Amino acid sequence: MPDPLWDDVARLLDPSGGGTLPDVYIADTTAADWQAVLDLVVERGWSYEYSEGRTVLPLPRAAAVLSRPADAECPNLRVWPVAEVCAIFRFLGDEQIDFDVSLWELQGQERLDVLCGFLAAIGRRLGKPVPMYFEGDTRSPFLGYDVEADGVRVLWTAVDG
């Protein structure tokens, strides 16, 4: 399945339309799924920065991050599939992998292709859908990797004029 064209999603990715950090939630995950994502980041050679609070640290194993005390600094992993596009992962629990990206970084076909490749790489590695939601909304994804179609597709059908 071909990835979406910019003209088909430009309105969905317009940063002036409200929230600018759409959320990606991969449900029903485990620590092993988190580790698979960390391994993928390293294997692909994507630039990354792992931090706990303001302290930058070497990338740990997922089990170590997910077993941290609840009152510890929130760990974050910033991943750059290309220099201009950053995904920020937050290790809030093993049952869900979540990250966000900035709409300001996703303008135009070239950047959309980067996003689609990133979502697809994660979805293929995990064998799971990778839906993207408008910031703060977890009810209706608007874009995402579809496992059965093996591609990223537009999921939103009710865009207001």
Image (cartoon, rainbow, N blue to C red):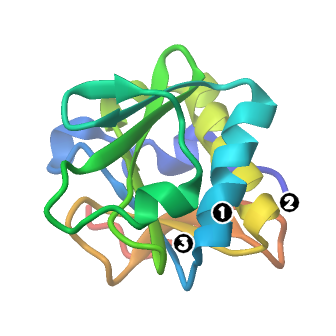
The location of residue 74, given as percent across then percent down, is: 23, 51
The location of residue 86, given as percent across then percent down, is: 45, 30
Mark 1, other Cα within 10 Å: few <14 / some 14–19 / many ≥20 = many
Mark 3, other Cα within 10 Å: few <14 / some 14–19 / many ≥20 = some
For label 3, the residue is 155
Say which label, 3 or 2, has the lower sequence index.
2
* Quadrant of the snapshot with the C terminus: bottom left
What's the amino acid at mark 3?
A: Leu
What's the amino acid at mark 2?
A: Met
Mark 2, other Cα within 10 Å: few <14 / some 14–19 / many ≥20 = few
The location of residue 73, given as percent across then percent down, is: 19, 48
Please tell me which residue is depicted at 64% across the width and 32% down the height of the picture.
Answer: 114
Q: Nearer the viewer, residue 137 or 10?
A: 137
What's the amino acid at mark 1?
A: Arg
Q: Is residue 23 above or below residue 147?
A: above
Q: Nearer the viewer, residue 6 or 22?
A: 22
For label 1, the residue is 153
